[in-house]
């Protein structure tokens, strides 16, 4: 029996660790899709998705978001009915890797300077800022992936630490954490702020605000990383060009960092 698409949508968004803004964006995109596709929702074709995602002369980032939202929605629908096909094929999502002009990745000397600035940073919540910077630069994570991490996603094994990374459009990827990144997180955890029901010492988002809520991936990471860069005299002129995406695009300085 085919599920109610609205139930699938609500259940998917409730179970998936996303920032509030991303959750709102995905909700709006899928609702728009459902209004368009109607009764054909469980029989849609890739051509339908391609036409919808490119509508109104959508730019690549918009198309990528639309396809990602549908991939996640249909992936979750398959937990209700395994025979539902996912028409939002991965190839329909345009690759969005080009950084905005003037926002280049750091070169190796700059990356070393930035790590030094992270280690010496003494601004507000310094342990959290350092942990975030190590996740972005040390594991090549995008801001939304770092912010989406929950305590349950962080696993310590006998000889290594792994992290369950949320992928755009749904799904996860378990990656080994470079030891320097794991140490930065270990240093941060005793200082992690919690406030029920948003977080507790044992559960909830890994990176929290001073009110115990999940960080906002759209503004907080870049703002914090620029604050770090501004403290180093050799990076001060480069500070306006620092973004969380630029750090994620910088090759990890740690051997074994995820790409």
Image (cartoon, rainbow, N blue to C red):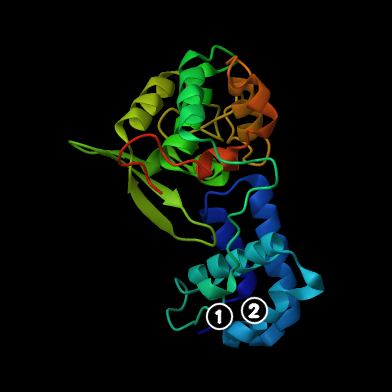
* Pointer 2 local density, CA inside 10 Å: few below 14, some 14–19, many at least 20: many
Q: Is residue 204 visible?
A: no
Are the two marked residues, 2 and 1, in contact with CB atoms closer than 8 angstroms? Answer: yes
Q: In this view, does 125 lie to the left or right of 182?
A: right
Q: Is mark 2 on a helix, strand or loop?
A: helix
Real-space CA distance between mark 2 and mark 1, rounded to the nearest whole angstrom:
7 Å
Q: In this view, does 42 lie to the left or right of 53?
A: left
- Which quadrant would residue 36 be assigned to in this image? bottom right
Above or below — where is 132 with respect to 149?
above
Toward the viewer: 100 or 71?
Answer: 100
Q: Label 1: which residue?
A: 87
Toward the viewer: 196 or 49?
Answer: 49
Q: Position of residue 185 (x, y in %)?
A: 40, 28
The residue lying at 61 percent from left, 45 percent from top is 19
Q: Label 2: which residue?
A: 49
Mark 2 or mark 1: whose residue is earlier in sequence: 2
* Pointer 1 local density, CA inside 10 Å: few below 14, some 14–19, many at least 20: many
Q: Is residue 156 visible?
A: yes
Q: Is residue 226 left or right of residue 177?
A: right
Q: What element carries label 1?
A: loop
Say which mark, if any, is on residue 152: none
The residue lying at 60 percent from left, 35 percent from top is 215
Q: Position of residue 188 (x, y in %)?
A: 43, 22
In the displayed orientation, state which residue is furthest to the left: 158
Q: Position of residue 27 (x, y in %)?
A: 68, 61
Q: Is residue 56 left or right of residue 107?
A: right
Q: Where is residue 80 in the image (x, y as percent from the top left)?
A: 47, 73
The residue lying at 68 percent from left, 64 percent from top is 60
Total tally of numbered discs in the picture: 2
The residue lying at 70 percent from left, 30 percent from top is 240
């Amino acid at each position: 029996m085919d599920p109610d698409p609205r139930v699938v949508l609500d259940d998917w968004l409730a179970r998936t660790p996303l920032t509030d803004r991303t959750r709102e964006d995905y909700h709006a995109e899928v609702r728009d899709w459902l209004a368009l596709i109607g009764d054909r929702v469980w029989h849609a074709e890739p051509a339908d998705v391609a036409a919808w995602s490119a509508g109104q002369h959508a730019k690549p980032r918009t198309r990528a978001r639309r396809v990602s939202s549908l991939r996640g929605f249909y992936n979750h629908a398959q937990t209700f009915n395994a025979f539902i096909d996912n028409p939002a094929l991965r190839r329909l999502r345009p690759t969005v890797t080009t950084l905005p002009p003037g926002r280049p990745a750091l070169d190796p000397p700059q990356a070393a300077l930035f790590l030094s600035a992270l280690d010496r940073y003494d601004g507000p919540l310094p342990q959290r800022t350092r942990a975030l910077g190590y996740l972005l630069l040390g594991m090549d994570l995008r801001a939304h992936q770092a912010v989406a991490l929950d305590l349950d996603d962080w696993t310590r094994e006998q000889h290594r630490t792994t992290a369950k990374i949320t992928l755009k459009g749904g799904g996860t990827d378990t990656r080994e954490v470079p030891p320097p990144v794991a140490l930065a997180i270990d240093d941060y955890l005793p200082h992690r702020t919690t406030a029920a029901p948003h977080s507790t010492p044992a559960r909830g988002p890994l990176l929290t605000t001073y009110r115990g809520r999940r960080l906002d991936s759209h503004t907080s990471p870049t703002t914090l990383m620029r604050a770090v860069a501004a403290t180093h005299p050799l990076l001060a002129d480069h500070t306006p060009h620092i973004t969380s995406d630029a750090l994620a695009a910088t090759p990890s300085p740690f051997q074994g960092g995820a790409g």
